[in-house]
Image (cartoon, grey):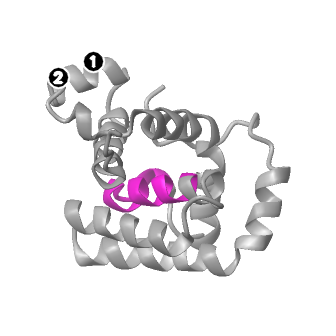
Amino acid sequence: MTNFSRSRTRKFLYQYLYAKTFNLVENESFRDSFFNWIFSSEIDETYLSEMQKNIAEKEVFYIYVIEKFFPKFNVVDMDLAFLLPSIIALSEIFSYFEELPIKVIINESVEISKSYWTDSSRKMVNWLLDSVNKNIASLEQEYKEFDFTKPYKSIFVK
């Protein structure tokens, strides 16, 4: 049995999404240029693929949730060290809710945020995800009813 590291996979996903905010990035070429496949045995390929697809398809909802809890901020201008861990966590919350406890998702996202930025980013991520956790029932309903086809803000280069 192969032992995958979701933690390492989340960090890889963070770095991939970070690069994708600046350039049109393909997963294969990113790996080749950045990791040269050194870490491939430690990355959960299935989880990574599902998360990349989910974030691409559902980003509009995750941006909506962030704006809902931070209405005075323009998401496009927010720091990526806050946005990316938050988007990864929101994707996990709404896709892996039954598999992963929300507290684990929050802790992992805070750790990613601490790895790539400052204490204020960690606090913002923690506050946002704690707020999501407290409002999960209403957000799940909004998720079910959300129109994913309407144009909305994006932080990724398409």
Q: Position of residue 139 (x, y in %)?
A: 74, 66
Depicted 148 relative to depicted 129: above or below: above
Q: Is residue 3 left or right of residue 76?
A: left
Identify the residue at image location x=27%, y=18%.
Answer: 29
Q: Is residue 35 left or right of residue 5?
A: left
Residue 75, visible in the rendered structure: yes
Q: Secondary structure at mark 2?
A: helix
Identify the residue at image location x=39%, y=64%.
Answer: 109
Q: CB under 8 Å between callouts 1 and 2?
A: yes
| Residue beneath disc 2 | 33
Q: Position of residue 96 (x, y in %)?
A: 60, 54
Identify the residue at image location x=32%, y=39%.
Answer: 2
| Residue beneath disc 1 | 29
Depicted 84 relative to depicted 37: above or below: below
Q: Position of residue 126 (x, y in %)?
A: 43, 77
Depicted 123 relative to depicted 83: above or below: below
Q: Quick one: quadrant of the N terminus?
A: top left
**Which quadrant would residue 107 be assigned to in this image?**
bottom left
Q: Secondary structure at mark 1?
A: helix
Q: How many marks?
A: 2
Residue 25, visible in the rendered structure: no
Closer to us: 150 or 26: 26
Magenta: main secondary structure equals helix
Closer to us: 76 or 141: 141
Determine if the magenta segment contains residue 84.
yes
Q: Amino acid at mark 1?
A: Ser
Closer to us: 101 or 71: 101
Q: Amino acid at mark 2?
A: Ser
Q: Is residue 45 left or right of residue 74?
A: left
Other-residue count near label 1 (Cα within 10 Å), few / some / many at <14 / 14–19 / ≥20: few
Q: Position of residue 17 (x, y in %)?
A: 37, 40
Residue stretch rendered in magenta on the structure: 76-91
